[in-house]
Amino acid sequence: MTRTRPLHLILLAALGLIAGYALTTVLVMQGWPALVPPLSLAAALVLIGVVLLLMGRPVRQAAAGERRVDPFYATRVVVLAQSSAFAGAVLAGGAAGIELFLLTRAVVSVGSTLTAAGTLVAALALVAAALVVEHWCSLPPDDPTEETSP
């Protein structure tokens, strides 16, 4: 399995930013309230990141040779880490788009702005946790003198 590429995360974040800004703009133009992520979303994203780190710890120990772990479990953890990185990037972009919309208004709602900022920080924390777990799931090279191929 290949590692998550930064370009993919950046593209997904840009897509989320455009979608978040455009959706909020359209909603406000139609007379609806601005889209503001709930505070529970930020808490859930942090919780998912913590669970992901806890799930990746046995795989890290197995990669270091300290214990054995089921290879299917390790595969599931790395796939969950990669999908969490993608989802976190999209949510971070969406929260940034909402934040950008809220900050460009004449009257700034402090509560909505802080909630969107909290979601942005939590989504970035999820991406960081996912990338750390994905790194933990990689095996060291068999021969330390052997060069890795690109």
Image (cartoon, rainbow, N blue to C red):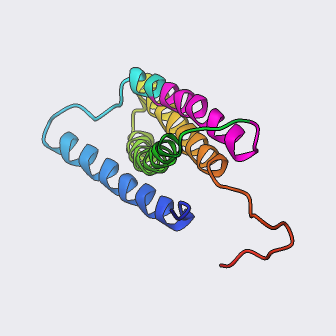
Q: Residue at x 61, y 49 (%)?
A: 137
Considering every residue shown, the one lying at the far left of the view is 30
Residue 71 shown left or right of residue 61 in the figure = left
Count of all numbered marks drawn on residues in the image: 0
**Magenta-drawn segment:** 45-66
In the rendered view of the protein, which quadrant contains the C terminus? bottom right
Residue 61 shown left or right of residue 74 in the figure = right
Considering every residue shown, the one lying at the far right of the view is 145
- Estimate the x, y position of residue 31 in percent, counting from the top left: 14, 36
Q: Residue at x 52, y 67 (%)?
A: 7
Q: Nearer the viewer, residue 105 or 3?
A: 3
* Residue 18 image-quadrant placement: bottom left
Rendered position, 60 above or below 21: above
* Residue 66 image-quadrant placement: top right
Rendered position, 143 above or below 136: below
Q: Main secondary structure of the magenta part?
A: helix
- Estimate the x, y position of residue 100 in percent, counting from the top left: 43, 46
Is 57 contained in the magenta span? Answer: yes
Residue 94 shown left or right of residue 47 in the figure = left
Is 6 contained in the magenta span? Answer: no
- Estimate the x, y position of residue 9 in percent, counting from the top left: 49, 59
- Estimate the x, y position of residue 36 in percent, counting from the top left: 34, 31
Residue 79 shown left or right of residue 133 in the figure = left
Q: Nearer the viewer, residue 68 or 138?
A: 68
Q: Nearer the viewer, residue 150 or 102?
A: 150
